Image (spheres, rainbow, N blue to C red):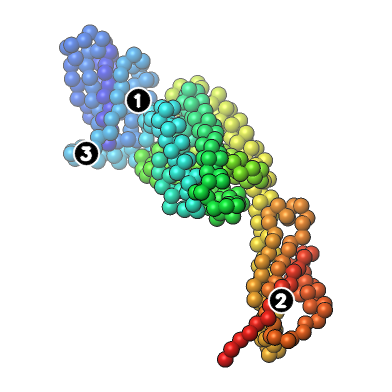
Amino acid sequence: MRLVQVFVPQDQLDLVLETADEAGVDYTVSQDTDRGEFEALVSIPVPPAAVEPLLADLRTAGLDERSYTVVTAAETIISNRTDDLTGRFSRTRISREELQSRAADLAPAASTYFGLLVVSTAIATAGLLLDSAATIIGAMVVAPLMGPALAASVGVVVDDDALATRGVSLQIVGLAVAVVTAAVIGWGLRGTVLLPPGFDITTVPQIRERITPDFLALFLALGSGVAAVISLTRNVGSVLVGVAIAVALVPPAATVGLGIAWGHPEVVLTAGTLVLVNMLSINLTALLLLWASGYRPIQPETVDRVTARLQSRVLVLLAAIAVLSVVLAGVTYGTYRTAAVEHDVTTELETMNEEQLAADSELQFRETAIDYELVDVYTSRQPVVTVHVDRPPGEQLPDDFADNVRERLESATGVDLEVIVELATALRSG
């Protein structure tokens, strides 16, 4: 329930009471004898879904804009008179006015926002370097990125240019600060005793996950945008949703910073693409869902203009996502090709081992190493496959043994390979 309190200006009490009567809501009136500007305070308990139509009726009736209208959440209502009201207003979303107020509150002061963002990025960067998922998730709890994303979308939908501009600015500058923070930390840690000699960030699983994004990565961003709007409009689970949005943005941004610190342009490109696609997708889904939920500007005459502006913004977001998705498509295909070659090589060597076993041969293909990276798919560099072969003492292998192995593996993979066969003499007892 909500308690709507209207500070009624002089000579407008009858207007407010008639509006409340027409809406069929209960109210109480407190006369104001201390100040000449207001003549009464009218308190009206209503369900959340009734707030927006009630405020709209008051505006239509001509309530002075200089009046105060305060909407507060009522923790507990003890009355059997609320059942009828609740049944009449069955919507679950909050009013436009509450939405706008909450969105503004979620975009904190700049000092608070950037302070929390730097701290969360620092923790996330440490989590990436340590390959610690728990540390990364812990950092996301304090990351304040949910507010700006929602503020930008709410500002567009309700025609609040200041709120929209603030939300967009905080997102762009915030992600830039996250990248710079991670880069500075990376520069500071590189070559110190805190990291092993020759440390390569591209070999860390948590970092590698952010530099090999595919289309499935969009599900996190799209789902986070939907969940953020639901949590805002229904006031549920905002902390957990904020974590999901932060996971989609902060770790990839930190990865971009580490790519700058270590001088890996491919890391900057792929992780940077993931950051941008996630940010745009979150904003796109928030815009569409807020509009679909029925939120519109307060002034009816501005609806057409806001609709046109929203459509143009949606088209721009879709176009940007489509362009950036070219990189995701390339990464998706490249990842598939490298994984397919590795799978086919491993499967074929297992088949060759089974053939040796069936022939009572002690020859064994023990293990392989495959040097085939994502970038190799697009540079036409041949995969290099190293095969370790155990053979009994004294057994001679044909001179073309390595060529035969290569032909088998090329036939299985459909790719030209460079095959290195390393022979080892196996001694077995018993």
Whichever of labels 1 and 3 marks the residue nearer the N terminus, that label is 1
Residue that label 1 marks = 55
Q: How far across and down, in percent of the image, does residue 150 sit? A: 46, 35
Residue that label 2 marks = 423
- Badge 2 marks a residue whose secondary structure is strand
Closest to the observer: 389 or 336? 389
The residue under the point 49% across, 52% down is 130
Q: Residue furthest top?
A: 36
Check disc 2 and give the amino acid type. Answer: Leu
CB of mark 1 within 8 Å of CB of mark 3? no
The residue under the point 74% across, 62% down is 383
Q: How far across and down, in percent of the image, does residue 94 sit? A: 37, 35
Which quarter of the figure is the C terminus placed in? bottom right
For the residues marked 1 and 2, what is the alpha-carbon distance in whole angstroms? 83 Å
Whichever of labels 1 and 2 marks the residue nearer the N terminus, that label is 1
Whichever of labels 3 and 2 marks the residue nearer the N terminus, that label is 3
Select label 1 or label 3 by which is in front: 3
Q: Is residue 81 above or below residue 12?
A: below
Residue that label 3 marks = 76
The residue under the point 60% across, 36% down is 317
Q: Residue 364 appears in which quarter of the rendering?
A: bottom right
Closest to the observer: 235 or 360? 360
Check disc 3 and give the amino acid type. Answer: Thr
Mark 1 neighbour class, 10 Å CA radius: few under 14, some 14 to 19, many 20 or more: some
Select label 1 or label 2 by which is in front: 2
Mark 2 neighbour class, 10 Å CA radius: few under 14, some 14 to 19, many 20 or more: few
For the residues marked 1 and 3, what is the alpha-carbon distance in whole angstroms? 22 Å
